[in-house]
Image (spheres, rainbow, N blue to C red):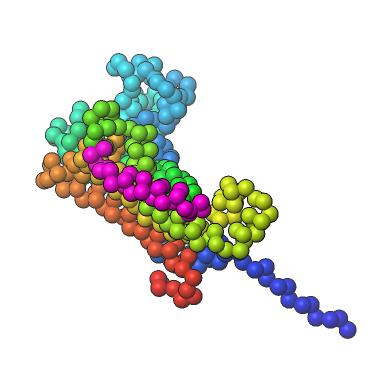
Amino acid sequence: MSTPKQPKNDKPLSVFQRRWRKFKTLKRGWYSFIALIVLYLLSWLNPLFFNDEALVVSYNGELRFPIFASHIEARDLGQRKIGSPDYRALKLQYEEEDAGNYVVLPIYPYGPLENLLTDPTLDGMRPPTAPDGNHFFGTDDRGRDVLTRLVYGFRISITFALAMVFLSYLIGMTIGAIFGFFGGKVDIFGQRLVEIWAALPFLYTVIIISSIIQPSIKILIPLLAIFSWVGISFYMRGEFLREKSKDYVAAAIAMGEPNRRIMFRHILPNALTPIVSFAPFAIVGGISSLVSLDFLGFGLPAPTPSWGELLNQGISHINSWHLVVFPLTALFLTLLMVVFIGEAIREAFDPKVFSRLR
C-alpha cells in the first residue's frame, strides 16, 4: 500500500514579493502603471508613427530609408526642388507619374518641428488652425501639428522627470544617510547647511541662469535636482537614525564591517520605504516643474516640443481652444496615472492588512 504524497510546502514570499502582489491587486494603480509603461516605451518609437520623414522610398528600383538617413537631396528622388524632400508631395508626385515608384509614410505624416505654413492641408488659413481631418488636434501659432508635438512632449516630460528624480534622490539619499548614520556634529552642522540651501529661491536662480545661458535639458535636469533633494534627505536621515540602533547594525559593527558597507549594504535596503513611496509623487513634481518653466519661458529652448509652451500659446490665442484643451488634457491624464501609481505603491508598503483602495 503506497503512502499518500505529502503536499509540498510553498516557498515563503519575500517582503518585496508580498508588496508586489498587493500592488497588483490595487487595480487603479496597476492598470495605470501598465498603461504608462506601455505609452512611454511606445514613445521611443515616435519617429515610426509621427514623422514628416518617409519610412521607405522606392525610386527607379532603388530602396531608400530616409528615416534612418542623415540627409537626402530632393533631386536624388526626382523631386523638383532644392534641399530636403517634401515626402507628402513626393508621394502624390509618384502616384501621378505611375512609374512604379512609391513612398511609405508614417501613420501620421507630420513632424514635431515641421512648419506647415505653406502646406496645402491648411488651405491658406492662418495658424493656429482648429482640428480637422488632416490635423486631428489642429496646429499651433507657427503652423506645427499639435498632436505630434504633444506626443513628443510626453516622452520629453517623462524622461526629464525620471532623470531629475533619480539624480535628486541620489543626492538626497547620500546626504541623508551620512547625517543619520554618523549623527552628532555631522548631523547638527549638516542640517543647518541644508536649511540654508533650502531657503534659496529656486525660481530666481533659474531666471538668473536663463539670462546668462540658454537652458537645455542637460542643464535643467541637474539644476532642478540640486533644489529637489532636500525633502528626501530628511526622510532618509530619519530612516538611518531608526535603523542604526537595531541589532543587525550592532552585529555588523562588531564583525568589523566598514561604515560604507554598513550604510549601503545593510541599512539602505531596509530604509527604502520612503524612497519608493514618494518617487511617483516626485515624478509628478518633475513634470509640473518642467511644464511651469516652459510656460514661463525659462524652460527648454524653442522649438523643442513642450506642453508648457503649447499652454503659453493657448493664453496668447485664447480663442484657439485646442491649444488649451488638448495640452491640459494630456497633462491631467498623465499626472492622474502617476498619482494612481503612487497611491497604490503607498498602499502596498502599508503594513496594515486591510486596504483602503479598492
Q: Is residue 182 magenta?
A: yes
Q: Residue furthest left?
A: 319
Where is 38 relative to 353, above or below? above
Q: Position of residue 111 (x, y in %)?
A: 32, 34
- Identify the residue shown where x is 28% and y is 54%: 332
Relative placement, left or right, of 142 versus 263 is left
User: In the picture, residue 138 is in which quadrant?
Assistant: top left
Q: Is residue 56 visible?
A: yes
Give the magenta part as a residue range: 180-205
Where is 299 relative to 357, above or below? above
Q: Position of residue 280 (x, y in %)?
A: 40, 55
Q: Is residue 225 magenta?
A: no
Where is 266 relative to 319, above or below? below
Q: Nearer the viewer, residue 199 or 322?
A: 199
For the N terminus, which image quadrant?
A: bottom right
User: In the picture, residue 217 is in which quadrant?
Assistant: top left
Q: Position of residue 341 (x, y in %)?
A: 41, 59
Q: Is residue 42 visible?
A: no
Relative placement, left or right, of 152 versus 146 is right
- Identify the residue shown where x is 12% and y is 45%: 318
Label the magenta part by its dominant secondary structure. Answer: helix
